[in-house]
Amino acid sequence: MELADLLSPSRVSTGLPAASKKRALEELSGLMAAEDPALTQKDIFDSLLSRERLGSTGLGHGVAIPHGRLKKSQRVLAAFVRLENAVDYDAVDHEPVDLMFALLVPEESTDEHLQLLSQLAQMFSDPELLDRLRSAGDSDSLYRLIKNWQP
Amino acid sequence: MDFTNQVILIFSLLLMASVLASLFSARLGMPVLLVFLVLGMLMGEDGPGGIEFEDVQSAHLLGSLALAVILFDGGLRTDAGSFRVGLKPALSLAIIGVAFTAAITGVAATWLLNLPWLFGLLIGAIVGSTDAAAVFSVLHSRGLELKQRVGATLEIESGSNDPMAIFLTIGLVELLAAGKSELDWTMLSSFAQQFGLGGILGVAGGFVLLWLLNRLRLAAGLYPLLAMSGGMVLFGVTSSLGGSGFLAIYLAGLILGNRPLQAARNIRRFHDGIAWLSQISMFLVLGLLVTPSELVTTAPQAMAVALVLIFLARPVAVTLSLLPFGFAWREQLFVGWVGLRGAVPIILALFPLLAGLEYADTIFNIAFFVVLVSLIVQGWTVAPAARWLGLEIPPRTASWQRVDLDIPGAFEYELVGYRLEADSPATGRLIGALALPDRSRLVALIRGEQLLGPEVPEVKFEKDDHVYLLAAAQAIEALDRIFITVRTPERLKAQQFFGEFVLNGDAKLADVAGFYGFPIPDEAVDASIADYFRRRFHNQPVIGDRIRVSGVEMVVRDIKEGVVVQVGLRLAQKTD
């Protein structure tokens, strides 16, 4: 499974003015809910939030990868936002987060999904990519940056 | 006059050569103590130095003095927090372990050298203890950061097993000097006396010294001297009363090092220097004392004794002593390997000489040879062994500059300084946007010669800024993470080592398993992550402990008061 296949330009958003971690997660849930009629924003949000309760998904350096599993979802879905202002995320390095990549996987999870998460974590620890994502102008260029990233 | 000047010149040259040689040893990864010892031998009668030194009595005095200082410094540096995981296994090693090591080595020595068996046992006792100076210096060299279970156990062991070896040696020497050829029960009561008195006087004396240091108003330079002389008085008093002075001074150092203490940094820095001086002079003098050409005559037997000690006696003793503590085999193997012998066996080997025992020369030469072999074989390979056995953990950062403020009633506050580098985490961030830990405050920002801040929230940190903060000791680790760039080898990068995500210790294992779709063992259904680790690691989990559950791995990331508060989750094992 390729990372680029999970994302579409419609699920990338930039300059989102979220004031808190919860608000940001809601926005991400909304982006993903719009894609699959079987899913509601609330279901997705609850799943992401319950994962956060087990431990923050903030990776450090201002990046978070919230993720969840849902019974009703049929395929892997992703969304990406860049926040206007970084929000407090309780991340390992205590830095506030402004880049968020959300991943939603179906109930019958496979090793492939674990690999996917690992790959995302690797991708978002590339300082060069983070710099580019932060200075990119619009959501289209954000989408292209993620799509074209090579390890 | 001329003699005085010459002695001063020779000794200062030797000291300087030793200091400079330490640079060279760091580059080669050679244990620095070995360098000092060899330098001493080169200066001695068989080497180019040609100095004749055969004064056993003064060598013994200097050696004991130096050892006491080194143990005091070791105590000052030992974090009492490490006692949580290290104390019990270390004590077991220090008492049972030394006895087994001495017995096995002793039997081998009796047979190999064809000596009466009490003399063989004496050799075993002499080389029975690991050396605090050697272990501390090897473990703290070159940023080696070990799993706490292993590091703490080894350090506490090396600080506390000398009394056992000293007691065994003195007991045997007294028996032999009295012309006996069988073991005697009086040894047991003398053992209790050594440990009991040493322990009680060490703790009591430590607290008295602490009280004195915090109460008196002295010139700044006198605090370290008061601490050292206090420790030495304690050593002397305890020893004259028949207790173990070495144990007492180690415990006193431990107490001073782990309580709020006036002029603490000053005292530490002084003792760091004085401990180096002690190590250098002790090893130089011991190197001078030995006659290398005499070592050769017993070399094959001595080599055999050393090999038995390293490959049989120590590993067996470690395995038996650690049986109740649930160490993993890799950890046991490593503890067995770091059975470094150092100055203690050489100093102990002076006792038979002083008592005028038969075979005393042979015993001294064997002990010296064993120490040489141990320093070369084990000292050189500790770091690679730790790496090979996977016992390293990512290093912590260290502040660039720390100054005691000695604020009356609040000794724990310090002034910490950092020089920012281009890739320091704080560089480029707004001062106002920085989230500082509790009990810390920015007090100055100095750029070039200009004093900026702290009231400039809209200024960004730049490369080469000097940042000063007032902070309580507990906040400093968090500050280090903000201001210092950690350059770690790839395999120890946090993400590589601890995994991609973090989980809280109180999260239920079943909930985590639900998210990642891995099965969990039946007995863990209701357990939190912290419980699960506690059960699996005999109630004493440490940072770096890992549990694998079908493809994913959890690695302990942080521990507070013995409870796992954070673990890393490794999803992909790329490098295993």
Image (tube, helix red, strand yellow):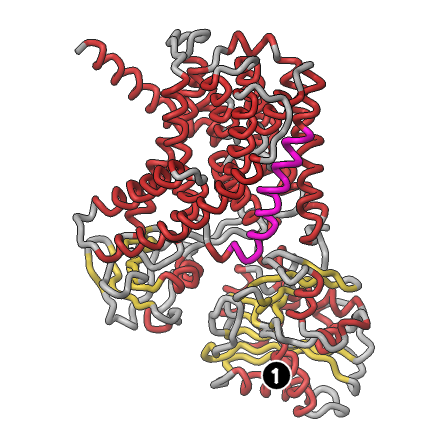
Packing grade of label 1 (10 A; few <14, some 14-19, many >=20) is many
In the picture of the structure, the residue carrying the numbered disc 1 is A28
Query: Relative to B428, does residue B42 appear above or below in the rendering?
Result: above
Q: Residue at x 71, y 18 (%)?
A: B111
Residue B381: x and y, percent?
A: 60, 33
For residue B274, which quarter of the picture? top left
Residue B93 included in the magenta stretch of the image: yes
Nearest the camera: B283 or B486?
B283
Q: Residue at x 67, y 45 (%)?
A: B321
Mark 1 residue element? helix
For the stretch drawn in magenta, the main secondary structure is: helix
Disc 1: host chain? A
Q: Residue at x 49, y 37 (%)?
A: B132
Which residues make up the magenta segment? B82-104
Query: Which image quarter is the N terminus of chain B in?
Result: top left
Is residue A149 visible to us here? Answer: no
Nearest the camera: A34 or B151?
B151
Residue B504: x and y, percent?
A: 60, 72
Nearest the camera: B432 or B501?
B501
Query: Relative to B244, does residue A1 appear above or below in the rendering?
Result: below
Q: Is residue B81 left or right of residue B465?
A: right
Nearest the camera: B464 or B12?
B12
Is residue B438 visible to us here? Answer: yes
Residue B232: x and y, percent?
A: 33, 39
Please name the amino acid that badge 1 sits on. Leu
